Amino acid sequence: MNTPTLSSPLLSARNITKRFGGRIACHDVNFDLWPGEVLGIVGESGSGKTTLLNCLAGRLTPDEGSVAYETASAGTVDVHRLSEARRRLLTRTEWGFVNQDAREGLRMGVSAGANIGERLMAVGARHYGEIRGSAADWLARVEIDADRLDDRPTTFSGGMRQRLQIARNLVSGPRLVFMDEPTGGLDVSVQARILDLLRGLVERLHLSAVLVTHDLGVARLLTHRLMVMQGGAVIEEGLTDQVLDDPQHAYTQMLVASILPV
Amino acid sequence: MPDTNMTEGAYNYAYLDEQTKRMIRRAILKAVAVPGYQVPFGGREMPLPYGWGTGGIQVTAAIIGRDDTLKVIDQGADDTTNAVSIRRFFAHVADVATTTRTEEATIIQTRHRVPETPLEDGQILVFQVPIPEPLRMLEPRETETRTLHALSEYGVMQVSLYESIARHGRISKSYNYPVQVNGRYIMSPSPIPKFDNPKLDRSPALQLYGAGREKRIYAVPPYTPVKSLDFDDHPFEVERWTECCAFCGSTESFLDEMIIDDAGKRLFVCSDTDYCEGRR
């Protein structure tokens, strides 16, 4: 196994363009994501953030451009040229995907333990005690009481569901996590707790992440680098603090100025 | 083979027309070549309702010949309505000998049981299958279940077993217990009790499964490994009874529990009537 050096990016997107009919959802996006880095994509709704994220994660096929990913053991692969089998394997072992709506990312009909254990079982874990052990461990790491292990997510609050979804994704030890508005739709105190949790996990596990959000506060807290999108194009990018403290583009200036002061 | 009919001339030999039987045989050949894979076929209307064995009857009709001896069982018994009707149907339209003796039969059509008497080389076991897709209750979309089979992504099946242990302390599924055929496809063994699952493993008989409503045929060729899914620390096990059969005294066969009076007195008897009678 060759460890990726700093000279090679984990994920690099080149000229990503996606159209829906005549409408351009994202246009000519380029970036490199380095190991251990958290990249934020911000912009107003309809600016193409989620489409871009889905293209990166292999859920949508872009009309133009390519996404190269440096795998843990098999060198660099073009995400959209992999066979479906390889791509699906990649998405449930080396990647994670946290949806805004936890119901899309969870199996609501089975217990929290089974939700967390699914990825382990999918790659061949067949020891019930060990699977349950890792599920309990991850439940603790996302700060859910151990006695909720056998409860269904339907009995969980929104914040707990979101934390469960995070645990379910991280149990397989992914290297790259895609997050689509992970704190959208939650009240602020719950948001703060999840942000805290995510920040801790990203640092401890040395995760790389692509985070889509419309909330500049979330971006400030979690991301190292920021891309600002408007109308499907990236209009400004740079270090998060730099972009937020000294925005260059008029639209970014407007975004930053729209943050409500407390 | 002179397959244009018998005395009345109303129906073709074995009820189905020759083109239909040829189509079903092609599906069977494909199913045998890919053990456990569900092959779609053009299921026909049969003179009985879905759920009564239309799939099994079509498979039997496609493989039966005048030299065959047919046995039909329903829940292990030769004398229940479904078994008697299907046996009489084929005696009438296919002009075959019928039997209740497992060892004399060349084709055994069954619902819900595998005979207790060990099967032999050359015998064919035809199962009636209500729901051929083992992942159906876990994944409602047919397109998705096909993808899961194609890529052998069977984590979700294991999730259902995990959930069962978490909820009940053991794998509570007692019939239609999922199996993996030849290390590849996960297959529904039809609603046989899990007691019968070990009999499917490396069986000398050919197993054919027909689902009439869902129009699928699948098969397990002779001597093919069939593994019941489980966990390392919760291994697959079959049910056991503390009682023995009240008629034949067997302690090895699958027992039906019957309540015989208003006081709740119970009696255990073999579900396989032919096996039970042979031992008395």
Image: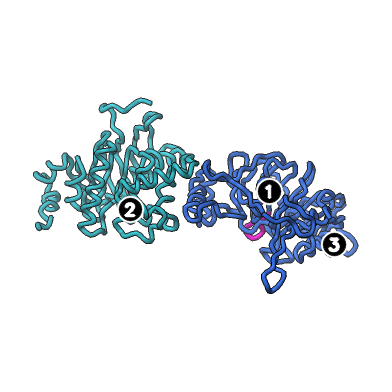
Chain colours: A cyan, B blue
Image quadrant in which the C terminus of chain A is located: bottom left
- Identified by mark 2, the residue type is Asp
Residue B247 picture quarter = bottom right
- Identified by mark 3, the residue type is His
In this figure, which residue is indicated by the disc labeled 2? A145
Please count the marks in the image: 3
In the rendered structure, the answer to whether residue B118 lies left or right of residue A128 reads right
Q: Where in the figure is residue A83, as x and y percent of width and height?
A: 46, 38
Query: The residue tagged with tag 3: helix, strand or loop?
Result: helix
Gap between marks 2 and 3 measured at Cα: 66 Å
**Disc 2 + disc 1, Cβ < 8 Å:** no
Q: Chain of mark 1?
A: B
**Which residue is at 72% across, 41% downward?**
B222
Query: The residue tagged with tag 1: helix, strand or loop?
Result: helix
- Identified by mark 1, the residue type is Ala
Residue B211: say if magenta: yes
Gap between marks 3 and 1 measured at Cα: 25 Å
In this figure, which residue is indicated by the disc labeled 3? B92
Binning the other alpha carbons within 10 Å of mark 3 as few (below 14), some (14 to 19) or many (20 upward) gives some
In this figure, which residue is indicated by the disc labeled 1? B27
Image quadrant in which the N terminus of chain A is located: top left
Q: Is residue A91 visible?
A: yes
- Farthest residue toward the right? B7
Q: Where in the figure is residue B6, as x and y percent of width and height?
A: 88, 60
**Which residue is at 33% across, 53% downward?**
A145
Q: Earlier in the sequence, mark 3 or mark 1?
A: 1
